[in-house]
Amino acid sequence: MPEFEVQFYPFANVNNTIRLRDNKMKLRISDLLEGAPENVLRAIFHILLAKIYRKPIDADHATRYRRYVSSHDMAKKSHLVRQVRGRKRIVSAQGHTYDLEAIFEELNARFFHGLLARPQMTWSGVHARNSLGHYDPAHNAIVVSKVFDHPHVPRYAVEYIVYHEMLHLKHPVKLRGSRRCVHPKEFQDEEKLFPQLEEAKAFLKQL
Ligand SMILES: [Zn+2]
């Protein structure tokens, strides 16, 4: 039995590697998989070990791993990390129209008794519409799509996006068995406290 060294590693993508050298087995697991359910991590280890010993890969493990990686959440996460790691990060909370830090502080006072610690607030560098915003726990950052930094976008719409991500800060992803619960009931109830929820959703929908 070789000695094992296993670590999460900040690859730019979901990537896992295995190497055997001098009777030392070195595994690097994408840090995007930190927090993955145990059965997914088991599947990864099975796949990597099968690869290095040239044994057949169990179909259940292969499916479990593939399903997890292609899930919506992972895709989003890896997209963000690629944006952040793939190029020099320009962190800017102050946009042309809206200042995300100011919006955060205002919402913090209005809805959270000022209790949330402010993460890195930044407009995304990309004009992508597929994602309004996201909270990135790896970098403790709230990223909002630059599309919304525009005078035609009402302030309440930007506030709603930031508010939603602040709720992600407050309610970390829960595991229910091996299922990830991203928007638990407490989250949804609290989201309803935002006064212009319906207007904001309607506005964002018609974009
Ligand atoms: Zn969400």
Image (cartoon, grey):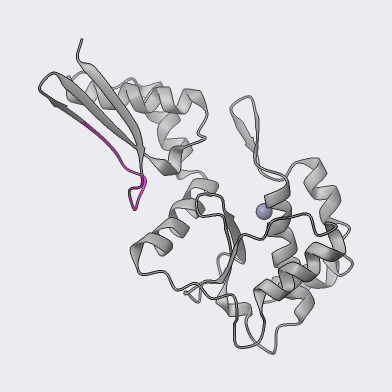
Using the image, determine if residue 166 lies above or below residue 95. above
- State left or right for residue 104 relative to residue 134: right
Residue shown at 32%/28% (left/top)?
A: 6
Residue 37 seen in this snapshot: yes
State whether residue 111 is above or below residue 202.
Answer: above
Expressed as whole percent of the image width and height from the top left, the position of residue 199 reads 83, 72
From the viewer's perspective, is residue 48 above or below residue 164?
A: above
Between 152 and 203, the one lying in front of the other is 152
Q: Which region shows up in magenta?
A: 10-18
Q: Residue sitting at 45 percent across and 44 percent down?
A: 70
Chief secondary structure of the magenta span? loop
Question: Percent from the top left, x then y, of residue 51?
Answer: 21, 26
x then y, percent, for residue 10: 36, 47
Q: How many marks?
A: 0
Q: Quadrant of the C terminus?
A: bottom right
Can you say which quadrant of the picture contains the N terminus?
top left
Q: Within the image, what quadrant is residue 140 found in?
A: bottom right
| Residue 72 belongs to magenta span | no
Q: Residue furthest left?
A: 22
Report which quarter residue 143 is drawn in: bottom right
Residue at 61% across / 64% down in the picture? 133
Is 71 in front, or is 38? 38
Q: Is residue 186 left or right of residue 57?
A: right
Q: Quadrant of residue 17?
A: top left
Please tell me whether residue 17 belongs to the stretch shown in magenta.
Answer: yes
Q: Is residue 49 above or below residue 83?
A: above
Left or right of 163? Residue 37 is left
In this view of the protein, can residue 56 be seen by the observer? no
User: Residue 37: percent from the left, percent from the top?
Assistant: 52, 29
